[in-house]
Image (spheres, rainbow, N blue to C red):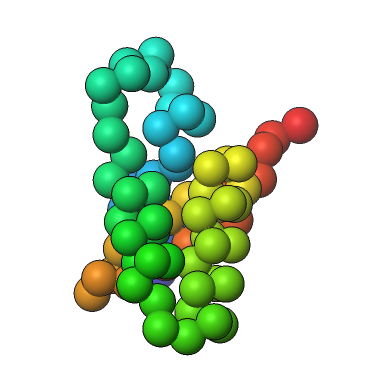
Amino acid sequence: MTDEIEQTKFLFATDYQLHKNLSLVEVNKNIIDFTEKKLEKMIKAARHTLDRDRLETFLTDYKKGLIAISWSHGQPKHVRVTKDK
């Protein structure tokens, strides 16, 4: 049962992405980070201050590499990123 749970966690973890500047591959200036663009679009379209603030926090933390983002039903889901010491 434990192995099954660990595999499930791994599968879900693959849905998340880091900001393009934090990837392990060299960043091409022509690469577009669609998560960044989608968050920016959602911020502009937000009707409520709380929604806008939450999305702005996601975008800021995403760009800093503090969170990774996945999408579910058009909404961002995030996990905190920790760095091994």
Q: Is residue 52 visible?
A: yes
Foreground residue among 13 and 4:
13
Residue 46, compared with residue 9, is above or below; it is below
Q: Is residue 11 visible?
A: no
Q: Position of residue 79 (x, y in %)?
A: 52, 59
How many marks are shown on the rendered structure? 0
Q: Is residue 31 left or right of residue 2?
A: left
Q: Residue at x 45, y 41 (%)?
A: 18
Q: Position of residue 25 (x, y in %)?
A: 39, 18
Q: Residue at x 67, y 38 (%)?
A: 83
Q: Position of residue 81 (x, y in %)?
A: 59, 48
Q: Residue at x 33, y 18 (%)?
A: 29
* Residue furthest out toward the right: 85
Q: Is residue 16 left or right of residue 80?
A: left
Q: Is residue 59 left or right of residue 4?
A: right
- Quadrant holding the N terminus: bottom left
Residue 72 figure quarter: bottom left
